Image (cartoon, rainbow, N blue to C red):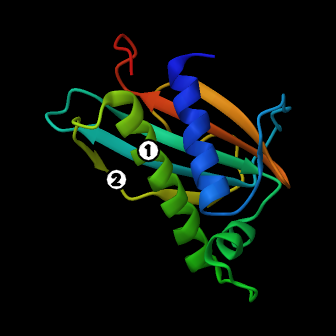
Amino acid sequence: MSELEGVLRRAAEQVFEGLCFLEVDHGAREVPAGWDLVSSVGFEEAGGARRGALVLRIHGLEAGDLAESMLGSEEAIDDVLAFDAVGEMTNVMCGSVLSAYMGARAEFDLRRPTVSRGGHGHGCPSRAHRRVVVGLERGVAQLELHVDHPGESP
């Protein structure tokens, strides 16, 4: 496992276990053909040296399930609030990954998260530099770091 893959795994653990109270399993997982949720946060380093996106793909859990776990709600949560919660999860993961891997002194502007149901892709301009898959109590998540400058290491 590379250093960056370790950073991605820790970010997934922190959010799924710390915010959503879902146990993470790092055993081998099969990647599904399609995803139930896709969320991404774009970023750009101050000065424009590096830019890209962190993409979270989830299979087996709906936005409402994640939001209910995150917010501790026993009542059904509407789609707007549920998508906001998933976007915030992705935002927290992105900040954690950028700080841990790029350095705490690096400054990045994060774009507003986008969240959608289903799909195979999510409009990222580059191939993923690194990708990790983690199992969840009910499902699987894939976290990807994309960087626009393929010749430059993220």
Q: Is residue 145 left or right of residue 105?
A: right
Q: Amino acid at mark 1?
A: Ser
Dividing the picture into quadrants, the one containing residue 82 is bottom right
Give the number of the mark in front: 1 or 2. Answer: 1
Q: Is residue 71 above or below residue 146?
A: below
Q: Position of residue 61 (x, y in %)?
A: 78, 60
Specify the quadrant that holds the N terminus. Answer: top right
How many marks do you count on the picture? 2
The answer to which of 138 and 49 lies nearer the viewer is 138
Q: Can you identify the residue that label 1 sits on?
A: 96
Element type at marker 2? loop
Element type at marker 1? helix
Dividing the picture into quadrants, the one containing residue 76 is bottom right
The residue sitting at the left extreme is: 47
Dividing the picture into quadrants, the one containing residue 60 is bottom right
Q: Is residue 142 left or right of residue 2?
A: right
Q: Is residue 139 above or below residue 28?
A: below
Q: Can you identify the residue that label 2 sits on?
A: 111
The answer to which of 132 and 84 lies nearer the viewer is 132
